[in-house]
Image: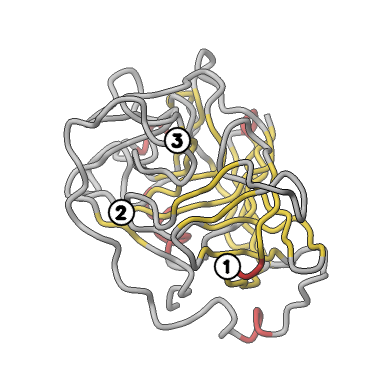
């Protein structure tokens, strides 16, 4: 299966990690868990990383999220369909309300990993979109101009049940994947809530604690305001230790077997809703 065009994979020569991670008690190079960047779309790190990524995102795959028969006929108003907004401007202004006098914040796009900022759309009013924001506090929303983004549709959904060590990925009524996961340790819990995937990174080697791929999420750790040069961003990634699956091992992220995260990386666009249930 070909990957959707809204999917960006960043190849890092060395990982610059941001999150309330999954590296266990000894996180590796510059961070904790999802190598989701010290250049997150949400906030810049409080300290400079010791090494920076040296490579850029790969070119977009040839197929788009709306090219398959399952997706091409989606209704944007259907309950199981997500609308994803991808930034087309260098700085996306975010407002507290439509037609507000001035923006409450601006998000730079692309981020330092070269990935355009994506938003999960939560409502619409005329030429304004209400979106979930990849910023603290978790669950933040704001309004952006529809002219600053392009829109795409998909019907994928991820559900994570931490207490059951399970993840379920669906596309509409179809089950894509249901399997065991590794979760956070008791002293660095993953906050429950509704998030979405913001970027997909490929570590330089699958033998790191992050495995073959790592998704950054729009949520952040409640334990770590910063983590090894990053803002404590949550993530879902692979692992170099299959025995960690089914265990409380991470500093906040969700671990999958490499074959499972690689399968998702070949299918999922960005902007997939992720419901984390404690």
| Secondary structure of the residue carrying numbered label 3 | loop
Mark earlier in primary sequence (2, 1): 1
Return the residue found at the far top. Answer: 187
- The residue at 38%/24% (across/down) is 227
Q: Which residue is mark 2?
A: 202
* Above-or-below relation of 158 to 18: below
Residue 14, x across and y down, in percent: 19, 43
Q: Residues within 10 Å of mark 3 (few under 14, many from 20)?
A: many
Residue 50, x across and y down, in percent: 17, 31
Q: Given this view, does label 3 or label 2 mark the residue nearer the observer?
A: 2
| Secondary structure of the residue carrying numbered label 2 | strand
Query: Whole-Å distance between the Cαs marked 3 and 2?
Result: 20 Å
Query: Whole-Å distance between the Cαs marked 2 and 1?
Result: 25 Å
- The residue at 31%/57% (across/down) is 10
| Labelled pair 2, 1 in contact (Cβ < 8 Å) | no
| Secondary structure of the residue carrying numbered label 1 | strand
* Above-or-below relation of 208 to 28: below
Q: Which residue is mark 1?
A: 149
Q: Which mark is residue 200?
A: none
The front one of 239 and 22 is 22
Mark earlier in primary sequence (3, 2): 2
Quarter of the image with the C terminus in it: top right
Residue 75, x across and y down, in percent: 78, 77
Q: Given this view, does label 1 or label 3 mark the residue nearer the observer?
A: 1
Q: Which residue is mark 3?
A: 245
């Amino acid at each position: 299966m070909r990957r959707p065009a809204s999917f960006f994979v960043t190849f890092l020569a060395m990982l610059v990690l941001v999150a309330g991670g999954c590296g266990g008690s000894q996180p590796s190079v510059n961070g904790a868990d999802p190598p989701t960047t010290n250049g997150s779309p949400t906030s810049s790190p409080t300290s400079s990383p010791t090494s920076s990524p040296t490579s850029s995102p790969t070119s977009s795959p040839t197929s788009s999220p709306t090219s398959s028969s399952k997706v091409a006929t989606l209704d944007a108003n259907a309950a199981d369909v997500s609308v994803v907004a991808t930034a087309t401007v260098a700085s996306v202004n975010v407002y507290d309300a439509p037609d507000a006098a001035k923006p409450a914040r601006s998000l730079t796009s692309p981020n330092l990993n070269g990935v355009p900022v994506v938003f999960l759309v939560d409502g619409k009013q005329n030429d304004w979109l209400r979106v979930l924001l990849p910023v603290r506090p978790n669950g933040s929303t704001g309004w952006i101009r529809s002219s600053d983004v392009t829109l795409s549709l998909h019907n994928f959904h991820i559900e994570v049940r931490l207490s059951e060590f399970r993840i379920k990925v669906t596309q509409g009524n179809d089950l894509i994947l249901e399997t065991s996961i590794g979760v956070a340790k008791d002293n660095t819990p993953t906050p429950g809530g509704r998030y979405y995937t913001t970027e997909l990174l490929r570590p330089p080697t699958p033998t790191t604690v992050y495995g073959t791929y790592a998704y950054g999420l729009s949520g952040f750790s409640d334990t770590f305001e910063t983590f090894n040069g990053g803002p404590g961003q949550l993530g879902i990634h692979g692992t170099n230790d299959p025995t960690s699956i089914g265990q409380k091992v991470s500093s906040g992220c969700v671990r999958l077997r490499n074959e499972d995260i690689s399968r998702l990386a070949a299918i999922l666009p960005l902007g997939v809703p992720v419901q984390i249930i404690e």
